[in-house]
Amino acid sequence: MAKVTSLEFSKTVYFSSLICDYLAEKPGLKAFYNRFPDIESFKSQIEEKQKFFTDDARQTLVCSLNKQYKGVKASEASLKNITLLEEATTFTITTGHQLNLFTGPLYFLYKIVSTINLAKQLKKHYPEFNFVPIYWMATEDHDFDEINYFNYSGKKVQWNRAHGGAVGELSTRGLEEVYNVVESEFGQSKNAQELKELFNNAYLNHQDLTSATRYLANELFKDYGLVIVDGNDSDLKRLFIPYAEEELLHQTAFKKVSETNEKLSNGYNIQVNPREINLFYLDEGLRERIVFEEGVYKVNNTKIVFSKSEILGHLYEVPERFSPNVIMRPLYQEVILPNLCYIGGGGELAYWFQLKGFFKAIDVPFPILLLRNSVLIQTESQTKKLKNLNISNEDIFLKRDAFINKKVREISNINIDFSEQKNHLLIQFEELRNLAKQTDKSFLGAVEAQEKKQLKGLDRLEKRLLKAQKRKLSDQVQRMTDIQNELFPNGSLQERNTNFSEFYLEYGKQLIPELIARLQPLQQEFLVLTM
């Protein structure tokens, strides 16, 4: 059993002011989201979504999912959840992620576990309704370089191949070479054999990246009723036709998101900027922007051109050719799913905050936004090291220089904090300023210049003394640096860098049930698990 401790996201220094302010429910952000993610908020969200989502949309969704699940060895729990989606009392909790090779970074697991656990928690609180956890595969993305690798033990395991178009349609040819690397790196333990079999079955026994990723996610989470959705589906795209037509003719997203960005940018960084048309044209080996120029619609970097009537006719005939970009994809998701809540990382939620005004303008309910669980996994040995070095949870999350400086000050037998001397100096110079004002005001500039010079001198002395102490305490500094490097590879959060395979090799099939047991999505704190 894992031991759990936690700390506030704002104390980790890895989350933006936007996310920290959202979690603190700062009033200035209220206009950019619908409802805050607490258990009571879901009652009103259910009522709002019930009015919007039609029985016809449910039938289309269930029919599409049944087609997508043909040939998939789904669990009874997942198949039951698909059937439940026909009922007006069933809603979804959704997360989405790229088709990263072998799940990519650890937070792939945390997103899905957060989604599963929130669905379970809502069922307990609202037993008259059903809640289905959804993993939305980003099959239409075309950023292959973002997904063609995973990190293992400090090494980059990479899939090299030519690419173009939607990544979900990419053939898995060439992944035999990656498997050979996996086989040599993972070793021969029982857990290693399970991992190698999982990789082999997913990538060498499936023809494209979509089916490989569906197999992988299903194998990891099928016992928990996870339902996997591929949005690159002609029937589901047909539900989206009115919104794609609106985008082509009126560019509402551009107008409304631009208005929101202007307001949001007063205090926060903008994550994405809208285009005048936020749709791509999708075909075999092709995913390019649709642009409106010189009175016609063009597919960027091609010779494909449509008049207004031609592109609308094409949309109604083959809606699957029209692919939403980062601005439109959230809308597509909310149109085709009876969704209540989207669970994502800080970067994802940042661009969702830009969309509230757009959703309102086209009368689509805006979902509750929930920051996914974040986790730092420590071994028992690492936890003991941290305790012996007197390093707290707050300490270990500090950036490298701040971490070392703080710990050196703590363990030094001399005081390396010149704050008292600086305060004394400031008092002295305040007296000199008063004296100058009473005698000759022309001396004020000289007094202030001397003050700055002496404060800088104290800063330099403090840094030199700290540097000298680091040399003197080099063994302890090295041990502290080593443990932080282990837990924060490449100076980043473990969950954004490390692949789940490193922990599966250690903990095997216990890993995911342990995460399911420990992660509480509405707790909204960063968890530290000692396994």
Image (cartoon, rainbow, N blue to C red):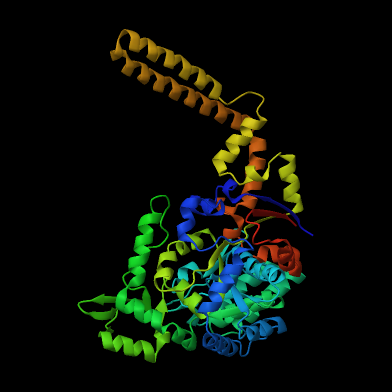
Residue, x 36% and y 66% (percent of image)?
A: 256
Identify whether 468 is placed above or below 10: above
Q: Residue furthest left?
A: 294
Residue furthest to the bottom: 317
Residue 171 x, y percent position in the rendering: 50, 83
Q: Is any part of residue 300 visible from this angle?
A: no
Q: Nearer the viewer, residue 124 or 16?
A: 124
Of 40 and 272, nearer the camera is 40
In the image, residue 148 lies at what x, y percent? 51, 70
**Residue 240 in the figure: left or right of residue 439:** right
Q: Position of residue 96 (x, y in %)?
A: 54, 71
Camera sees residue 252: yes
Tell me the quarter of the picture where residue 3 sits.
bottom right
Would you place residue 373 above or below residue 454 in this image? Answer: below
The residue under the point 47% across, 26% down is 460
Where residue 344 sits: x, y (%)? Answer: 55, 64
- In the image shown, does 259 or 323 lie closer to the viewer? 259
Image height check: is 39 above or below 199? above
Residue found at the very far top of the displayed protein: 439
The number of numbered badges drawn on the structure is 0
Residue beneath the point at 41% across and 19% down: 451
* Residue in the foreground of this view, choosing between 62 and 11: 62
Can you tell which quarter of the image residue 177 is in?
bottom right
The quadrant in which the C terminus is found is bottom right
Instruction: Give the residue drawn at x 38%, y 18%.
Output: 450
Quadrant (top left, top right, bottom left, bottom right) of the N terminus: bottom right
Q: In screen coordinates, is 431 left or right of 126?
A: left
